[in-house]
Image (cartoon, rainbow, N blue to C red):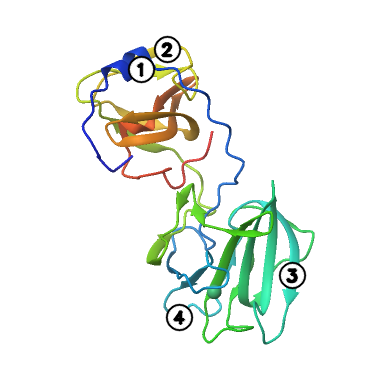
Amino acid sequence: MRKRWISLLVTGLLVGGALAPATPALAAPTFRVPFPCGQTWSGQTRSDHSPAYAIDFNRTDDAGDPVVASAPGTVDRVTDLGGTSYGKYVRINHGGGYSTYYAHLSGFNVSVGQTVGYGKVIGWVGSTGGSTGPHLHYEQRLNGADIQVRFNGSLALYWGTKSYTSGNGCSSGSGNGTVDTSGTPLTVRSGPGTGYASVGTVADGTRVTIACQTSGTSVTGTYGTSTIWDRIGAGRFIADAYVYTGYDGYIPNVPRC
Ligand SMILES: [Zn+2]
């Protein structure tokens, strides 16, 4: 976590481990920025966009730049609408009712029925359809309805323009963090929640390597309230609300457990 909201009396939570109902597993895929690893793009949202939660992506000289699948799935539409609407667009079905749209492409690199993974080039940025200049029009949908875009679990900016750096298709790695409890040792759990058994503690100030992150019970800690839990070893999880990672949400490129 990054934001330090309120200094809290945390001892009870740390040691007692308040029992909270387990959070249901997130059904949403982990979507990533739809461009190759390491690239930074300007993404714009605006309330008069159609549909409203779509993002238009640009960067300098972007015509012809590769567009990549933002999550694993199956391509279920590769369509050219000509000079109207999306123009050349690709839709990927990610399962669970989730799909993504990539519009105004200059060309296609996939076909219907093809299975794609993170970082797979599906086409190239263009200005086809109802577009006045090269850009990627990108949408996430659930059961056909436009939803607010999330990358790696973090909500996109609504409304406005923001830079997004892609962690898509990067070799997945581990992350780092520093435990910050203002003195009290942090309880390590056998799973991602306060209801799991305590399997030890880590001292305040300990540097930890985070192999993966997942969603578990909500914990309020040094950096606010979060359902994110960090796996720091086999059967060893700590609440991300007490870990300084430099990120408000999930750490880019660190996989989900
Ligand atoms: Zn658009």
- In the picture of the structure, the residue carrying the numbered disc 1 is 187
Q: Secondary structure at mark 4?
A: loop
Q: Earlier in the sequence, mark 2 or mark 3?
A: 3
Q: Please state the horizontal and vertical placement of residue 34, each as a whole percent of the image.
A: 54, 61
State how far apart marks 2 and 3 are (Cα).
51 Å
State how far apart marks 4 and 2 are (Cα).
53 Å
From what the image shows, is residue 210 above or below residue 80?
above
- The numbered disc on residue 61 is 4
- In the picture of the structure, the residue carrying the numbered disc 2 is 198
Q: In the displayed image of the protein, which residue is found farthest to the front?
A: 48
Give the residue at x 52% y 57%.
148
Q: Secondary structure at mark 1?
A: strand
User: Relative to the observer, which residue lies in front, 124 or 187?
Assistant: 187
State how far apart marks 2 and 1 are (Cα).
6 Å
Q: Earlier in the sequence, mark 1 or mark 4?
A: 4
State how far apart marks 3 and 4 are (Cα).
25 Å
Instruction: For label 4, count other residues whose C-alpha is less than 10 Å away and answer few (under 14), some (14-19) or many (20+).
Output: few
Please, what is the three-letter code of the amino acid marked with disc 4? Answer: Asp
Q: Mark 4 or mark 2: which is in front?
A: 2
Q: Please state the horizontal and vertical placement of residue 240, each as a whole percent of the image.
A: 37, 32
Whether residue 14 is visible to the viewer of this picture, yes or no, is yes
Please, what is the three-letter code of the amino acid marked with disc 3? Answer: Val
Verify CB contact (< 8 Å) between mark 2 and mark 1: yes
Give the residue at x 38% y 16%.
17
Tell me if 195 is positioned left or right of 141 in this view: left
Q: Earlier in the sequence, mark 3 or mark 1?
A: 3
Please, what is the three-letter code of the amino acid marked with disc 2? Answer: Ser
- The numbered disc on residue 117 is none
- In the picture of the structure, the residue carrying the numbered disc 3 is 78
Please, what is the three-letter code of the amino acid marked with disc 1? Answer: Thr
Q: Mark 3 or mark 4: which is in front?
A: 3
